[in-house]
Amino acid sequence: MINPDSVGRTFHGADLVTVTQSEIDAFAAVLGESDTNVAPPTFSIRISLSQYESILTQPEIGVDWTRLVHGDQKFEIYRPVVAGDVFTCAATIETLRTVAGNEIISVRSDLHNGSELVVSSWSTLVVRG
Amino acid sequence: MIKVGDAVPTRVFELDRALLKAYADASGDQNPIHQSEEVAISVGLPNVIAHGMLTMALVGKFVTDWAGGSANVKEFSSRFIKPVIVPANEKVDLTVSATVVEVDGDRVKLDLVATSAGVKVLGMAKAVVIK
């Protein structure tokens, strides 16, 4: 069981995440995207998912990452991500419920470059029981 | 002039194990169910499956191309309803189409449909772009 006390908590990433051109180039190349002046629209999942993993697998929360599947995903992109962005990442556990033995976690990620909110995203993660 | 009901022409992407490996490296998602048949089967999957986010990223490429570039994509959402199954030494399809469902000035909302091997893999897939 996931610790229910974690619902509503916002976790701030300990480190700043700097986006590099080579990361954008590699992500774009997989998709056959030749314009790498800005990142593809789903690029920021690279940052958010990694942060979710580090938060949700902490012993106090206790998600088994190997049992996790992605249920849904939404992005709101206020401006495109570009190389040189330096993000602070805030992740919030919005809801937690159990359906048919599976734990369903709704999480939100906000990426700020300085005071500018660049991308918000919402993920539903399902921990299979 | 873009109007509600307009169809965006269907496009077919191809996925294979090499693409899954490339996406794993580019995204940092190294979950072995996207690379190892043995691990995938051990957790009850029929075979190696594509990352849901790879499927979504390819649909994002479809949206981006129609919108005239990544910078024009403002909102993008989807449910992952069925996996894209990727057997060894095969190429599988991801077939994507879309319909314009709202036009508000230069903001256009698309309903997206994505199938693989005839099975719908994304649900409620939508994007809002500036065009």
Image (tube, helix red, strand yellow):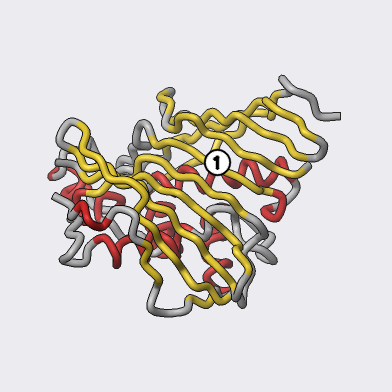
Outermost residue toward the right in this view: B1
Between A118 and A38, the residue placed more toward the observer is: A118
Does residue A12 lie above or below A44 as drawn? Answer: below
In the picture, the quarter occupied by the C terminus of chain A is top left
Q: Position of residue A83 (x, y in %)?
A: 62, 73
Residue at image point 60% right, 46% down: B61
Which amino acid type is marked by label 1?
Val
Q: Horizontal and vertical percent for residue B9?
A: 68, 28
Residue that appears at 50% across and 45% down:
A74
**Where A23 falls versus B58 (above or below)?**
below
Estimate the x, y position of residue A108 in percent, counting from the top left: 43, 54
Residue picked out by circle 1: B59
At 33% from the left edge and 60% from the top edge, which residue is drawn? A9
Left or right: B107 with respect to A6? right
| Subunit that carries the residue with mark 1 | B
Q: Considering depth in this image, is A38 or A51 the residue closer to the camera? A: A51
Seen from the viewer's position, the closer of residues A91 and A27 is A91
Q: Residue at x 49, y 73 (%)?
A: A88
Q: Residues within 10 Å of mark 1 (few under 14, many from 20)?
A: many
Count of numbered badges drawn on the protein: 1
Report the side of A30 relative to B131 (left or right).
left
> Is A81 on the left or on the right of B122, as rendered?
right
Is residue A89 among what the camera can see? yes
Quarter of image, res A71? top left
Q: Nearer the viewer, residue A6 or A20?
A: A6
Residue A50 visible in the shown view: no
Disc 1 on helix, strand or loop?
Answer: helix
Q: Quadrant of residue A12?
A: bottom left
Residue B34 percent location from the top left of the image:
30, 50
In the displayed structure, would residue B40 be above or below residue B99?
Answer: below
